Image: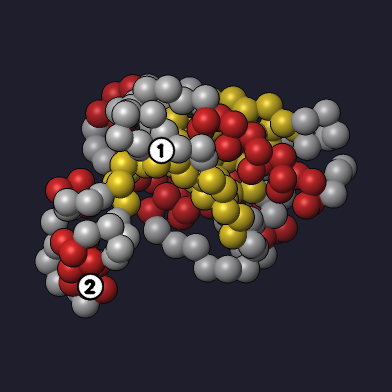
Amino acid sequence: MTDSTDIQSKIATACTEHLDRRTEWDEAPEILGLFGGDGRGLRLEQFPVPMVLWEAGPPAVMLGRYARAVVAFEVRALPDLVAVAFRYEAFALSEDLSPQAAEVLRRRKAGGSVPRNEHVPGRIEQRIVSAVDTQGHHYMITADRMGDGSASPAVSKLIPKGEQVTGRIPDALNELIEALHPHAAARRGTSGAGER
């Protein structure tokens, strides 16, 4: 097996390249598996997901339902799986984008009522790949929509094992990796579905 830093680099590169190859916006989300890690490189494969799943509700909610179904039906483990990823689109806010965005973020932190990000002036539309590997590292790869409809080059961030990452998408990806990889839960220090 190759060094874990090498695997992390390969996962980040594969996800970044996948995002950079996207040319359209408003695409359906996709769940991806990254397989290999045996020195020959990684292969990225889309999991079979019926389109009706993404039409039934918000992508993050439906990813969670998909993960719970995988756990409930005890889907066969995939021993050469090194990571799972979720590609989707969303609107991001930053305090320096507009006064309205800064106010929405302030109110959100205070627990107040706020509009959805897509309705806030100054929002940024993004393509995103969120991933988690069998060792417990999380990856966030983003590309911002430009004024001409293209996307900025994707930027990746590795969130090391042990740093708390929560939310619907990371929680669902954690469930998936633990269900689909025979030793992920043990390596990650959790007692999830991956230990059968």
Name the residue rendered at 57%, 48% in the picture: 156
Q: Is residue 32 above or below residue 65?
A: above
Q: How many numbered discs sit on the rendered protein?
A: 2
Q: To which residue does mark 1 refer?
A: 127
Left or right: where 172 falls relative to 12: left
Residue density around tag 2, few if under 14, some if 14–19, many if 20 or more, within 10 Å: some
Name the residue rendered at 25%, 50% in the picture: 123
Q: Indicate the position of residue 19 as horizontal and vertical percent values.
A: 51, 32
Q: Could you give the CA–CA distance between mark 2 and mark 1, rounded to whole angstroms?
A: 24 Å
Left or right: where 81 falls relative to 87: right
Q: Nearer the viewer, residue 116 or 104?
A: 104
The disc label shown at residue 106, or none: 2
Q: Indicate the position of residue 122 as horizontal and vertical percent values.
A: 22, 51
Q: Nearer the viewer, residue 150 or 162?
A: 150
For residue 70, say whether it is visible: no
Q: Is residue 182 above or below residue 146?
A: below
Q: Is residue 82 above or below residue 187?
A: above
Q: Nearer the viewer, residue 73 or 92?
A: 92
The disc label shown at residue 179, or none: none
Q: Quadrant of the N terminus?
A: top right
Name the residue rendered at 44%, 30% in the picture: 30
Q: Is residue 97 above or below residue 144?
A: below
Residue density around tag 1, few if under 14, some if 14–19, many if 20 or more, within 10 Å: many
Secondary structure, mark 2, is: helix
